């Protein structure tokens, strides 16, 4: 079975440098080294060094291709360097804050000039509505250029910020999947991937996906949001998602990010066990774990 992971983060040196500045560290210091030291994580080194380490990890784990997310606005060049070095293994994704004055230009540049494939929106983080004109402008470019959109809905919790004592003033009210209906009506052919099954907005994301065939879900992370619904467990989530959304719009993901932890094989094991217990057909499992990724992002 071909194994692809839609949801991984490229925590580059510039990412840690930005966190260091937010933590009040002085410019001129080796911010990436200091921050990763505080976290007890490995210093990523250069973008090419980090990309090479990811390739070694994927080869060791038997993973064919992954989506690499630039985890701060302005980080798109870091991921683009990794994609340029290993285009057969990485699909580049970048974060945009639609409220920034250069958001449209950066989006078009990342797609057309940097060779990236997915624009990532985090409304709870950047405090914008998904049905706003600013958000629609970003999605219009993705639709025009036949790219893909990633929209983080629901609860947003960033462990790296917690470990550094940085505030996370996110507002989950901006993360309702139903606010994407303006986009799904305007751009019905645009694939929109919502991670973590909606991260607490499971019912809403099911309604949206049932009404709009462009909506895809990714299965990434531990999906601890199920604690908000006492009648739910991860097995029920998968069973319902297959029933309502269908196997052709589900994408496997882990939410892997930093080293030395590396690629989270335990998430794969958990999800494979659940699908086996549910009796999901082999062809449907192959779609989730690899084929749907390759359809959205054809190799070569």
Image (cartoon, helix red, strand yellow):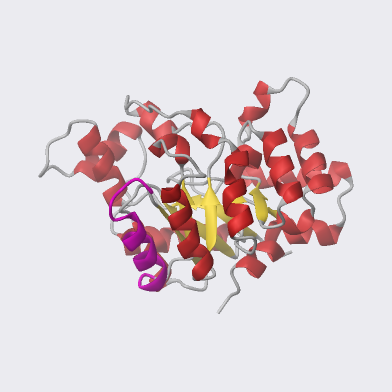
Question: Could you tell me residue 290's position as x and y percent?
Answer: 68, 62
User: In the rendered view of the protein, which quadrant contains the C terminus?
Assistant: bottom right
Question: Could you tell me residue 123's position as x and y percent?
Answer: 46, 40
Q: Which of the 4 image quadrants contains residue 222?
A: top right
- Compared to 98, does 170 lie above or below? above
- Residue nearest the observer in this picture, 112 or 29: 112
- Compared to 146, does 254 lie above or below? above
Q: Residue furthest left?
A: 28
Relative side of 88 to 247, left or right: left
Q: Residue at 51% across / 46% down in the picture?
A: 256
Question: Could you tell me residue 142's position as x and y percent?
Answer: 49, 63
Magenta stretch in the rendered image: 98-114
Relative side of 113 to 282, left or right: left
Q: Residue at 66% across / 41% down in the picture?
A: 197
Q: Residue furthest top?
A: 230
Report if residue 31 is visible in the image.
yes
- Compared to 147, does 239 lie above or below? above
User: Is residue 5 inside the magenta stretch?
Assistant: no
Q: Residue furthest bottom?
A: 300
Relative side of 102 to 259, left or right: left
User: In the rendered view of the protein, which quadrant contains the N terminus?
Assistant: bottom right
Relative side of 73 to 181, left or right: left
Question: Could you tell me residue 156's position as x and y percent?
Answer: 50, 33
Report if residue 221 is visible in the image.
no
Q: Residue at 35% across / 47% down in the picture?
A: 72
Q: Residue at 58% across / 75% down in the picture?
A: 299
């Amino acid at each position: 079975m071909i194994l692809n992971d839609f949801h991984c983060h490229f925590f580059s040196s510039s990412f840690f440098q930005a966190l260091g500045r937010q933590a009040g560290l002085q410019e001129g210091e080796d911010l990436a080294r200091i921050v990763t030291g505080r976290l007890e994580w490995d210093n990523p080194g250069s973008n090419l060094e980090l990309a090479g380490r990811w390739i070694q990890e994927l080869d060791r784990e038997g993973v064919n291709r992954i989506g690499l997310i630039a985890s701060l606005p302005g980080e798109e060049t870091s991921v683009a360097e990794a994609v340029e070095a290993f285009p057969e293994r990485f699909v580049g994704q970048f974060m945009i804050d639609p409220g920034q004055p250069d958001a449209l230009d950066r989006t078009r540049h990342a797609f057309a000039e940097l060779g990236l494939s997915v624009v990532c929106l985090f409304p709870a983080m950047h405090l914008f509505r998904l049905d706003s004109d600013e958000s629609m402008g970003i999605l219009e470019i993705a639709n025009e250029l036949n790219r893909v959109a990633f929209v983080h809905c629901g609860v947003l919790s960033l462990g790296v910020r917690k470990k550094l004592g940085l505030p996370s003033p996110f507002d989950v009210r901006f993360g309702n999947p139903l606010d994407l209906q303006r986009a799904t009506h305007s751009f019905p052919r645009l694939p929109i991937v919502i991670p973590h099954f909606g991260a607490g907005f499971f019912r809403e994301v099911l309604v949206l996906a049932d009404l709009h065939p462009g909506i895809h879900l990714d299965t990434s992370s531990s999906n601890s949001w199920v604690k908000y619904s006492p009648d739910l467990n991860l097995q029920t989530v998968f069973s319902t998602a297959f029933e309502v959304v269908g196997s052709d719009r589900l994408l496997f993901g882990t939410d892997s990010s930093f080293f030395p932890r590396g690629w989270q094989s335990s998430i794969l094991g958990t999800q494979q066990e659940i699908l086996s217990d549910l009796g999901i057909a082999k062809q449907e499992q192959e779609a989730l774990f690899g084929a749907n990724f390759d359809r959205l992002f054809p190799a070569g």
